[in-house]
Amino acid sequence: MPRDVSDDFPTENSPGVNVNCTDAVFMSLNLVDVQSVDSTILVDLKYASDDNFMQRQLYFTITKLYLQKDVAQRLAACQQYLQSIHPGYRLLVYDGVRPVEVQQRMWDALDTIPVAQRGKFVSNPKNHSVHNYGAAVDVTIVDEYKQPLDMGAGYDDIRKIAYPSMENEFLASGELQPHQVENRKLLRKVMRNQGFINIPSEWWHFNAYSRNEVKRRYKVVEKEPDCE
């Protein structure tokens, strides 16, 4: 039996962070802690540690997953739908709101890559990602042992094998296996149940609305709360 990796998902707040302050700042922007809406959703904030493709910590006062309130409620409905069709399965979310200043840190950290090529790895902060509004999630599914389903490419994998738009090609070449594509399709089915939109270059990224609709509905989150 695979080991239970529940201890791998952070449950305590990072030392030295005033979480009440962070909550208050985000609540003023109508953002909520997703686990306060549905505590069964698992969270592993990759950018709150160095366990990410940049190998550096980018969040310092954000220790929870925050989203716009209505987006969090829709994500909770996705979780309920998943459990209704696959009891024991749960959503695991890697990222939610990402302030523009953090997006800028990510952009600047890739300074060895020409600006014209940098957008392949990170969205240009000048354009405002849907993450910058708290209306996008990076998400996967875990099984009853809290093991992430095999998607054929890891989170933040920049290779084309991670592109939903190229699954048929990689399936035909044998680089993706049928069960890996089926796992991706399950994730899309669950998220589309509440109208989330998968982008063509990342199997894990889902927007709650189109970019134009997001800009109409919400205010951009410029800064990480200064709550240390």
Image (cartoon, helix red, strand yellow):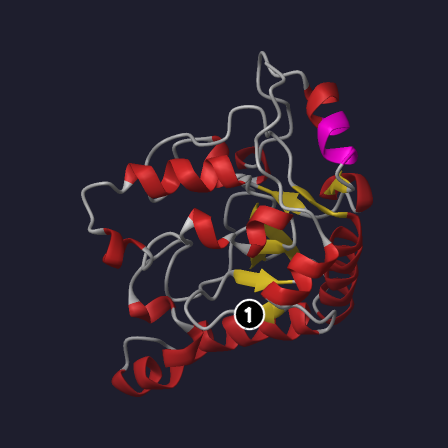
Percent position of residue 30, x then y: 78, 42
Q: Find residue 71 and report its image quarter.
A: bottom right
Q: Is residue 145 visible?
A: no
Check residue 27 for magenta coloring: yes
Question: Is 74 above or below relative to 184?
Answer: above
Q: Residues within 10 Å of mark 1 (few under 14, many from 20)?
A: many
Residue located at (74% from left, 69% from top): 194
Percent position of residue 7, x then y: 57, 33
* Left or right: 9, with 83 as reference point: left
Percent position of residue 142, x then y: 58, 55
Q: Which residues are magenta?
A: 23-28
Look at mark 1 in the image and give the residue it sits on.
198
What is the total number of numbered labels drawn onto the structure image?
1
Residue located at (64% from left, 24% from top): 12
Q: Find residue 106 and report its image quarter.
A: top left
* Quadrant including the C terminus: top right
Q: Is residue 154 visible?
A: yes
What predominant SS class does the magenta segment belong to? helix
Asked whether 196 or 36 is in front, the reply is 196
Give SS at disc 1: strand
Check residue 67 for magenta coloring: no
* Left or right: 201, with 18 as reference point: left
Asked whether 209 or 222 is in front, the reply is 222
Percent position of residue 68, x then y: 73, 48
Q: Find residue 217 and report its image quarter.
A: bottom right
Asked whether 9 or 104 is in front, the reply is 104
Q: Amino acid at mark 1?
A: Asn
